[in-house]
Image (tube, rainbow, N blue to C red):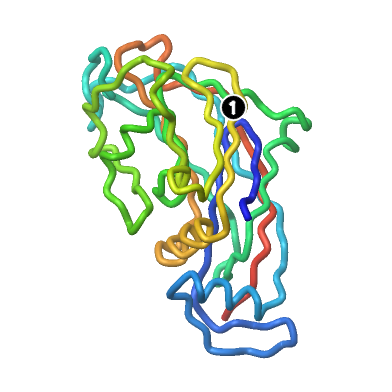
Amino acid sequence: MKRSVALVSSLLTVACSSGELEGEKGRQDSFSINSTDDIATACSEGDPISVTLEVEFPATDPDCPFGEGDNMDIENGVITARVEQFDSLELPEGVVVCDLAFDFQGITGGEGTPMVYDDNFWFTFDDVVLAGSYGPMVEEFDKDGNLPIYSWDSIVGYPFEFDDTIPTYCLGEADGSSDCDIPPPETNGVMSLSFDEDLVNELSLRAVQSERFDFSFITMGDNDPDRDCAHEYFAFTVEVPYVRVR
């Protein structure tokens, strides 16, 4: 079953940790998280506690740092520079996250928030590419199993076209494990993303292994200081049930 999320810029992700599980009846077992099956077992044997968390990405003005650091100088039709933003889920240490229930409407008054960006973007969780505006570019990234891992070095200098027929990218969409709607560049639109349970568990396992729960939004440009690397504000809340471990 897929988990629906409708929004301005959405996402899915989870996190876990290894340790000694404290069950709902006070029973404690030695328990380590090494697979997605371990995640399911920990959550089924525990008594989850739910918290609601907020993730925000403030609006960015057009300000591509062309020619700075590992960015390239201006070049038309080429990925030359980017702005990266980060936000993290604040969870207690030593927990297994069992689910994520996203709400992309509550923060913005229940209407949803139009997502506008220029030129292109990637949206990630713990570096896993969850969604992006230019689908063919995802082939440049290395993979952790089936998960593409964002790296600026892999795409800087990538040539792209300004063509609304170029497909967008959503993790799992190709094999039917996600449903997504991503607006094209420079267009008001509400993004929606949903991922099935197995895919979310893969993200959860990666969070266990990396010991972090970080979302990031990367906007990219080619040659226009007055437009590129910009997006409007977007945010969402996520209800997170987790099991305490020791």
x, y percent for residue 103? 70, 43
Dividing the image into 4 quarters, which one contains the N terminus? Answer: bottom right
x, y percent for residue 5? 64, 42
Residue toward you, 121 or 92: 121
In this rendering, position of residue 104 left or right of residue 156: right
In this rendering, position of residue 146 left or right of residue 197: left
Dividing the image into 4 quarters, which one contains the C terminus? Answer: bottom right
Total labels drawn: 1
Q: What residue type is labelled 1?
A: Tyr
x, y percent for residue 74? 24, 15
In this rendering, position of residue 68 left or right of residue 17: left
Count residues near mark 1 (Cα–Cα under 10 Å), then give few for <14, some for 14-19, many for 20+: some
Residue toward you, 24 or 195: 195
x, y percent for residue 94? 55, 72
Tell me, yes or no, if residue 132 can be seen here: yes
- Residue pictured at 54% horizontal, 58% vertical: 14
The answer to whether 73 is drawn above or below residue 241 in the figure is above
**Circle 1 is placed at which residue position?**
233
- Residue pictured at 53% horizontal, 89% vertical: 30
